[in-house]
Image: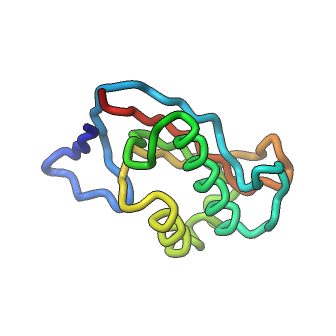
Amino acid sequence: MNKTHNPEHWPRPMGYSNAVSATGRMIFIAGQIGWNDAQEFESDDFVAQTRQALSNIKACLEAAGSQPAHIVRMTWYVLDKKEYLGALGQVGEVYREELGRLYPAMSLVEVSALVEDKARLEIEVTAVVPH
């Protein structure tokens, strides 16, 4: 079972954990972007692409015999941190709808470009399925 850890004297983080411990079978999911299973973008909207990327992550987890509750680490790559921050409330809603109320260790990095020109973000995931 995954367990979150946050130093006692630190403020509680919002939407993520500072550390997660887990034992089991590890799953590494390549960066997922906001295109559908035919590798087509249905929207240029940041929130819509976030929903699709998270849905793609769920599909990868299921293919590996896992589920969102097993996620221990996420790295988000965004083209524009202001776009992310401006949509944070909607991103949070979409995140909870797609993955539930789970708070893995998480990082967000602003990048100058992604391989797919229409992509607004890319999300990598590490999951650990308990023994």
Give x and y (percent) for residue 114: 77, 44
Image quarter where the N terminus lies is top left
Q: Quadrant of the C terminus?
A: top left
**In the rendered view, would you say 109 is above or below 100?**
above
- Between residue 5 and residue 34, name the one nearer to us: 34
Q: Position of residue 84 (x, y in %)?
A: 60, 64
Q: Residue at x 46, y 39 (%)?
A: 66
In terms of depth relative to the viewer, which is nearer, 6 or 100?
A: 100
Q: Is residue 86 above or below residue 33?
A: below
Find residue 116 and report its horizontal and vertical position in percent: 83, 46
Left or right of 102? Residue 90 is right
The residue depicted at 22 percent of the width and 43 percent of the height is: 5
Quarter occupied by residue 12: bottom left
Residue 70 screen position, x and y as percent:
39, 41
**In the shown orientation, is residue 129 left or right of residue 39?**
left
Label count reads 0
- Image vertical order of residue 57 relative to residue 20, above or below: below
Instruction: Between residue 33 and residue 80, name the one nearer to us.
Output: 33
Residue for point 58% across, 38% down: 63
- The quadrant holding residue 86 is bottom right
Q: What residue lies at 49% left-to-right and 30% top-to-bottom?
A: 27
Which color scheme is applied?
rainbow
Closest to the observer: 100 or 109? 100
